[in-house]
Image (tube, rainbow, N blue to C red):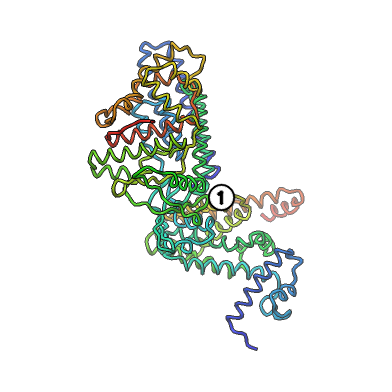
Amino acid sequence: MKVSKKTQKKTRIKLIETAVDLMIQNGYEKTSMRQIARTAKVGDATIYNYFPSKEKIVWAYILHRQECAVAKIAAIPNFETYGLQEQIHTYFETILEGYLPDREFLTVAFKITQQSFVTHSEDSAPINQVFITQIRHFLESAIQREEIPKQPIDSMLPHLILNVYMVIVMYWMKDNSTHFTKTTELMDLVLGILMGVLKQGLIQNCLDLGGFLFRHTLFSQVNSWLDGTIMSNVKTQFKKGL
Amino acid sequence: MSELPQKKRARLAKASKVVLKVAGQHAVHMAKTPFRKDTKKANKAHHEKIAKEIFNALATLKGTALKAAQLVSLELSILPEEMQTELRKACYQSTPLNRALVRKVIQSQLAQAPEQVFKSIDLTAFAAASIGQVHRAKSHQGRELAVKIQYPGIHQTIESDMKILRVLLGKLPVPILKEKSKMIHTMLAEVEARFLEETDYQNEAQNIDWFRQKNTINGIRIPEVIPELSTRSVLTMSMMEGQHLDEWLAGDPSQEMRDTVAQRLWDFFRYFFMTQQRFHADPNPGNYLIGPNLEIGVIDFGCVKQCEAGFPAQLARLVSYYQADQIDEVVSIYQEWGLISKRQPISKIKPGLKWFQEWVTRPFKEELFDFGAHPEYMSQRFSDNFKAVTDIIDNTKQDFVMFDRTYMGLLNIFQKLKARVRLSFD
């Protein structure tokens, strides 16, 4: 029997939601693919047509949340009249709002996916893509309406904002203030600083500085490894090599 | 937005720096004093310098702490008149919440996005409130609404700002601050309690309902709360149309119109104070909207004071004792309230109260007191004569702090309106 794309999408979402519910209830380890399939009323084998493993479901969950947030902000009346900071802030809050019912699961999800959709992998790429496309769209519109001066938005900048977003998510997961007020404050502050930099057209300088600091930290890290006794041979070899 | 912790520490450090700077200047001044010929002139210059530092520090305070600083500095006359006036004008305006933040507050408080909660809402505020901002909205039934949104984290900001103010007032080497530390303590406790109460919009909603129910004063309008759209940080009310008092005054209303508005304000205060022992304690001109037929919409009920049952009657008696020149009775009420210590000899108290007696009873002596004919009346509060009263006052009473703030605030408005008002507590 041929299944329509719409039904496929519905089943996919049903599987994701069921899996997350079960993982919250029983823990990741104790949840099996079969259990997910049965609870979602999908055939034991059919589930594999959608997801080859539990881990892939977790990745799909994160992607699904990102896509929902994009759809949600698109439905906000007059969203195009919002300023850049307001748009990014609303986008971040909307993603977090989507995670809210499964907030405790997020910690598990990050552990399973070895965190990061910051580091590039086959699984994280589509998630990053959704995020970066959205951010790039915000930036392009802001440049078009002359809210910020023209600046390179193709590569580093959206990734920098992705990093900022990840830090905020981490903070939010530990935030126990009422209605996550502290996260909102942090977001407001960080985005305020970012806007200041963008409006001054200083982002390239900041990215250069970021690159410098990164290299510097990496090199000092290498130095500290070389100081360890276990590594003394490596150090000698390394020095010899120099 | 409110401050993040590291910013709080930075501001505390800044306050401490002011203290150190002033203390340093004071030490240098004291060390040089024995060698000076013209001590009086040097003293004056020194006090002006210190006053300027204190002014600069106080004027950087925000919202609630600024209000508290205005109150304390006025009560204790720690600043010269011109700086006092300047500080009263200093009005810290928080940066308005952007649309993303307004969305977040509504979403988290009412569990729905703004466009679902209301038929329409303007996410850009049309007015600022003391700890939040007000938005125009329309209900799904088509009713015009005013939605007050509180700044997130304002509760903690008040506490930290009050801490900064306490550091400033507690450590500055200004003799009067040391002498009146008990009084400052009572004032700050009262002010902080009221301001923290203001952060609970559910409490304000109850206040509005209560005043609406009890109000019998002709020409006073009170908004209606929409309870299902109100929470601790969001307060939705019926929209009140009208002009702000200052705006209305700029339109040059007639003497009769100004008299009517002033009399209504006084009657509203007197009625609730005397009959209910409870009153609207925030006489900021921005809290009154003048509508058609000179009806006054009172719009901010965050700061409402509930007094002890006997306090209003005792206060009315105090005014009559002053009028009848029964100063022993006056002193005994002040002593009972703890304003004047029983240890102070009556021979010192009486001269201190003499000028004040004449000043405080003046508006009550005439059937209609014409503030326009006495343009100097309110500014006499800054006079040296007034300082004589401060000298004999040891402490204050919490009920008295808010009464005084409201009474003086109203009289300031009457002075501004150049109105003729029948003042009485009967």
Q: Residue at x 29, y 49 (%)?
A: B292
Q: Residue furthest bottom?
A: A1
Pick the quarter of the image with the C terminus of chain B.
Answer: top left
Tell me residue B54's x, y (percent).
Answer: 43, 29
Depth order, front residue of B420/B356: B420
Q: Tell me if residue A210 can be seen.
A: yes
Tell me residue B281's x, y (percent).
Answer: 43, 38
Q: How many marks?
A: 1
Q: Residue at x 41, y 14 (%)?
A: B350
Q: Tell me if residue B23 can be seen.
A: no
Q: Chain of mark 1?
A: A
Q: Secondary structure at mark 1?
A: helix
Depth order, front residue of A115/B201: B201
Q: Which residue is mark 1?
A: A182
Judge the density around disc 1: few (<14), some (14-19), many (≥20) Cα neighbours within 10 Å. many
Q: Residue at x 37, y 60 (%)?
A: A146
Tell me residue A45's x, y (percent).
Answer: 73, 80
Q: Is residue B80 left or right of residue B150?
A: left
Q: Is residue A123 left or right of residue A133?
A: right
Tell me residue A189's x, y (percent).
Answer: 50, 50
What's the amino acid at mark 1? Lys
Depth order, front residue of A32/B318: B318
The quadrant in which residue A60 appears is bottom right
